[in-house]
Image (cartoon, helix red, strand yellow):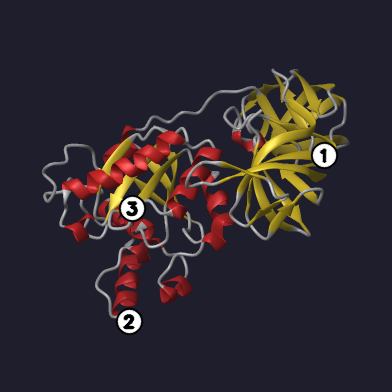
């Protein structure tokens, strides 16, 4: 059974790290030496067992008692392997949130039942939608603090469901949990007999692994000369390629034929996603950033309309940036900011010509020379990009086509 990549998102202090810690602990995924380290840390801080420390990657995080970087952890159920990504809830770490979430195929959105959906809860949900992650499980956490009250849970769950439906996300499951006590995480709660649905682990296991097969796409990372032959290397983003296949190199639209497929293991007749390969071609000679393709034609554009999220500082009209998507790096200008989105009301607000940190808006981007894109719902790796200013990532963008 294929593994599944999941991102955990939610407002600061709503319990993401504790939920991850519980999942790892209750599935027996925490090594013995790690458990001892956690117990020692809790003793030093004068705490009882804190499951959030299982997911906290740095000593500094433990001292501050807050999670500050995107970390990956791994666990298994009886059905499959999971990679679970803990994305921070703090505004200043939105960049990490986008980086982490972009690897995920499904999400758990965690909400503190005593506080309900807050501004960052809504922002994170909106980002999930932007990234094309629409398989979401809602975990209404800290049920122990309201004595496992069904009415209060239902009120918060319905508030979240209404917002998610408005942005186009249909919840897979809504689950009342206490990550601290372990209620409905791996084992069914004995304190909520009124709830008849799955646990978090059962809900995760119920999700199908959906990976669309698509045409062959390979961004050229570099080229080397081996025994007189020029070898173009990169990772296959989608599809398969065989020897003697005809390919097209974009954005130029030039054709070539695959003479050889090379890997560290030797020569292959055929290679498929996600293998790293080298290609010897006859015909056109690509360069770094070109996309070698077979099958349908990707989007080749000199300008695009896109949705972007400002991560650091500001994004301004008519400012120059560096566009980066896979190995493509092209100078560009944000010619116009059409509008920005109020993530709480979902109202589209008139543009002021500037997007500030954490703001989301629709922009028109003009490139110095054509870039290659695919719709994010078709091939996420070629539908997501970042904008850089002076070497710093200032925005993340999505191409919908």
In the displayed structure, does residue 203 sit left or right of residue 3?
A: left
The picture quadrant where one finds residue 205 is: top left
Q: Which residue is mark 2?
A: 44
Of residue 8 and residue 151, the one placed in the foreground of this image is 151
Q: Are marks 1 and 3 in contact (CB under 8 Å)?
A: no
Residue 179 % position (x, y): 27, 56
Q: First in sequence, mark 2 or 1: give its number.
A: 2
Q: Position of residue 109 (x, y in %)?
A: 39, 47
Instruction: From the image, tell me which residue sits under label 3.
Output: 116
Between the residue at mark 2 and the residue at mark 1, the CA separation in whole angstroms equals 55 Å
Q: Which of the 4 image quadrants contains residue 246?
A: top right
SS under mark 3: loop
Q: Secondary structure at mark 2?
A: helix
Quadrant for the N terminus, please: top left
Expressed as whole percent of the image width and height from the top left, the position of residue 363 reads 70, 41
Which quadrant of the rendered structure holds the C terminus? top right
Label 1 and label 3: CA atoms lie apart by 42 Å
Number of other residues with Cα within 10 Å of mark 3, as a class: few under 14, some 14 to 19, many 20 or more:
many
Name which of mark 2 and mark 3 comes first in the sequence: 2
Where is residue 126? Give x, y as percent: 50, 43
The answer for how far apart the CA atoms under marks 2 and 3 are is: 32 Å
Q: Nearer the viewer, residue 25 or 347?
A: 347
Query: Mark 2 or 1, which is nearer the eye?
Result: 1
Residue in the picture at 29% in, 79% down: 43
- Sequence-wise first label, 1 or 3: 3
Q: Which residue, given by chain and number where applicable, does mark 1 sit on?
A: 367
The residue mark sitting in front, 2 or 3, is 3
Query: Of the residues tagged 1 and 3, which is closer to the observer?
Result: 3
Q: Is residue 56 left or right of residue 25?
A: right
Left or right: 31 as drawn, with respect to 130: left
Tell me whether the residue at label 2 lies in contact with that at label 1, contact meaning CB atoms closer than 8 angstroms: no
């Amino acid at each position: 059974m294929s593994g599944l990549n999941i991102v955990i998102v939610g407002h600061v202090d709503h319990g993401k790290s504790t939920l991850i810690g519980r999942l790892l602990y209750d599935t027996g995924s925490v090594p013995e030496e790690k458990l001892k380290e956690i117990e020692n840390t809790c003793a030093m801080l004068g705490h009882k067992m804190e499951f959030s420390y299982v997911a906290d990657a740095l000593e500094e995080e433990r001292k501050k008692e807050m999670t500050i970087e995107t970390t990956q952890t791994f666990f298994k159920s009886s059905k499959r392997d999971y990679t679970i990504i803990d994305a921070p809830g703090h505004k200043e770490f939105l960049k990490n949130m986008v980086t982490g979430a972009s690897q995920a195929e499904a999400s758990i959105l965690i909400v503190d039942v005593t506080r309900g959906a807050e501004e960052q809860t809504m922002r994170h949900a909106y980002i999930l939608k932007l990234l094309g992650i629409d398989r979401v499980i809602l975990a209404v956490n800290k049920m122990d603090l309201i004595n496992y009250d069904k009415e209060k849970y239902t009120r918060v769950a319905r508030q979240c469901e209404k917002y998610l439906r408005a942005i186009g996300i249909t919840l897979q499951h809504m689950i009342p949990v206490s990550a601290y006590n372990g209620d409905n995480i791996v084992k069914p709660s004995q304190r909520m007999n009124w709830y008849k649905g799955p646990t978090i682990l059962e809900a995760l296991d119920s999700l199908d692994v959906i990976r669309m097969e698509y045409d062959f796409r390979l961004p050229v990372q570099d080229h080397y000369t081996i025994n007189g032959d020029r070898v173009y290397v990169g990772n296959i983003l989608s599809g398969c390629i065989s020897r003697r296949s005809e390919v097209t190199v974009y954005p130029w639209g030039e054709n070539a034929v695959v003479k050889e497929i090379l890997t560290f293991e030797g020569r292959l007749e055929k290679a498929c996603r996600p293998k790293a390969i080298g290609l010897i071609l006859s015909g056109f000679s690509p360069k770094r950033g070109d996309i070698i393709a077979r099958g349908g034609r990707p989007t080749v554009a000199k300008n695009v309309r896109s949705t972007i999220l400002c991560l650091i500082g500001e994004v301004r009209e008519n400012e120059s940036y560096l566009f980066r998507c896979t190995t493509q790096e092209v100078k560009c200008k944000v010619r116009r900011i059409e509008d920005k989105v109020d993530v709480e009301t979902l109202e589209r607000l008139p543009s002021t010509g500037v997007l500030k940190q954490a703001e989301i808006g629709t922009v028109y981007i003009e490139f110095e020379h054509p870039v290659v894109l695919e719709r994010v719902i078709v091939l996420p790796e070629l539908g997501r990009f970042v904008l850089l200013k002076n070497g710093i990532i200032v925005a993340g963008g999505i191409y919908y086509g």
